[in-house]
């Protein structure tokens, strides 16, 4: 049996009858940039996030960069970020001209550990970028409290967490702004790059709308330095077809996660640590990530058996060569470094079959029974 990490083909076949005419419509109308499809998606995603504004941008990385710029982050500022995340979280901080300050993760949720944030705050700190990793929100109450105390902005990196909730509150409701990615592999994926910022702050929303069009307002008059970073109509048209299905897909992911946890507990036992779901959390399982011993050997074995897995992420950001001049060394963030050595994500997508899940778990059990 072959079990891919992610298979988007079945979803396309199911939606093809709606997607193709939606694309055809964009081409026939020949309106490709910031038209009605983008407007509709912005309104729908903002409403879904329980906030007033959605600003469609070119990708999830730019979404973070633009949100940080709009809240005034620039050269000389520090921004607190987790180290156990995708590069873009810290990349956006550096591109905004500021310095990322890395904080260790909570070993249970893999998210930034709020207990370790305050020690990283200095008089240069301007914002915190918590990441809602794997589809579970970071501990927002604690983060909001620290931000209030030190007058910091919060940009939630929700690239992996559209539809996730914290004590019933949506992504974007508790931060200053939140950012989504529509990269094809994300829970709401386009057929190319795309992203969005959501916020309740009217002034901030207006700034971001200006920044994404070269900082121009009115057209050809530039008061701030912006970029070209827009969500295009074709991607928005595709996303408008997909969006109504998002909650149903998230429920299917949650169901697959339950299946995995049950099967792993029954068949593998203490050799794996299954995902921890915080009691505040509505987890939408962008990834199903476990901790294991001898992770790399397990991955190799599974690959030989036809099971694809992924390591999110093998090298913490504080140890990346590009950030060498920040002066971090091994041992600085022990929980992050441990997670980078132990975490492995199993195949996860709404169309995954129970037979495939059984096969994956059987093979994991086989690996640990032989070794
Ligand atoms: C995917 C991702 C991003 C970047 O999104 P792009 O649309 O690929 O630019 C940022 N942060 C996290 C945590 C991500 O997973």
Image (spheres, rainbow, N blue to C red):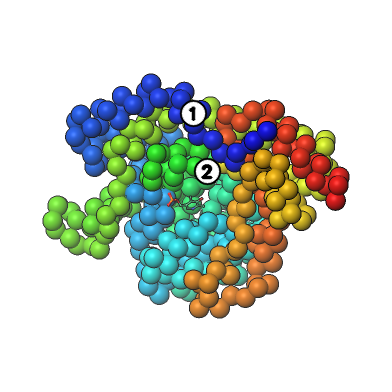
Residue appearing at x 38%, y 69% in the figure: 97
Residue appearing at x 39%, y 58% in the figure: 65
Front of the two marks 2 and 1: 1
Q: Nearer the viewer, residue 59 or 43?
A: 59
Q: Nearer the viewer, residue 18 or 331?
A: 18
Q: Which residue is mark 2?
A: 161
Q: Quadrant of residue 119?
A: bottom right
Q: Nearer the viewer, residue 113 or 1?
A: 1
Location of residue 325 with respect to 278 vertically, above or below: below
Location of residue 248 with respect to 235 vertically, above or below: above
Q: Nearer the viewer, residue 358 or 39?
A: 358
Q: Which sits earlier in the primary sequence, circle 2 or circle 1?
A: 1
Q: Quadrant of residue 50?
A: top left
Outermost residue, front side: 304
Mark 2 Cα-neighbour bin, 10 Å: few <14, some 14–19, many ≥20: many
Q: Which residue is mark 1?
A: 11
Left-right relation of 265 to 328? right
């Amino acid at each position: 049996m072959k079990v891919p990490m992610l298979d988007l083909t079945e979803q396309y076949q199911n939606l093809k009858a709606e997607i193709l005419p939606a694309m055809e419509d964009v081409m026939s109308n020949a309106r490709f940039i910031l038209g009605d499809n983008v407007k509709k998606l912005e309104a729908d995603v903002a409403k879904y996030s329980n906030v007033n504004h959605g600003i469609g941008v070119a990708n999830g990385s730019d979404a973070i960069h633009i949100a940080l710029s709009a809240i005034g982050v620039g050269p000389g500022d520090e921004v607190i970020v987790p180290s156990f995340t995708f590069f873009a979280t810290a990349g956006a901080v550096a591109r905004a001209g500021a310095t990322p300050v890395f904080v260790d993760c909570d070993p249970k949720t893999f998210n930034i550990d709020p207990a370790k944030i305050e020690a990283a705050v200095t008089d240069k700190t301007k914002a915190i970028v918590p990441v809602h990793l794997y589809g579970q929100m970071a501990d927002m109450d604690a983060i909001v409290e620290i931000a209030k105390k030190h007058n910091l902005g919060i940009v939630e990196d929700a690239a992996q967490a559209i539809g996730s909730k914290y004590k019933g509150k949506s992504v974007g409701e508790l931060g200053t702004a939140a950012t989504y990615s529509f990269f094809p592999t994300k829970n709401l994926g386009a057929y190319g790059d795309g992203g969005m910022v959501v916020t309740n702050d009217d002034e901030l929303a207006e700034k971001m709308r200006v920044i994404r069009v070269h900082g121009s307002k009115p057209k050809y008059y530039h008061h701030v330095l912006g970029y070209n970073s827009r969500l295009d109509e074709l991607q928005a048209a595709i996303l408008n077809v997909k969006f109504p299905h998002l909650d149903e897909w998230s429920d299917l992911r949650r169901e697959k996660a339950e299946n995995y946890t049950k099967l792993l507990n029954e068949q593998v036992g203490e050799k794996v640590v299954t995902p921890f779901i915080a009691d505040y959390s509505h987890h939408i399982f962008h990834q199903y990530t476990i901790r294991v011993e001898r992770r790399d050997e397990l991955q190799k074995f599974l690959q030989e058996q036809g099971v694809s897995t992924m390591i999110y992420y093998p090298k913490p950001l504080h140890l990346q060569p590009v950030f060498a001049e920040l002066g971090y060394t091994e041992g600085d963030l022990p929980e992050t470094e441990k997670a980078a050595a132990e975490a492995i994500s199993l195949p996860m997508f709404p169309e995954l079959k129970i037979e495939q899940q059984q096969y994956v778990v059987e093979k994991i059990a086989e690996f640990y029974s032989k070794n």
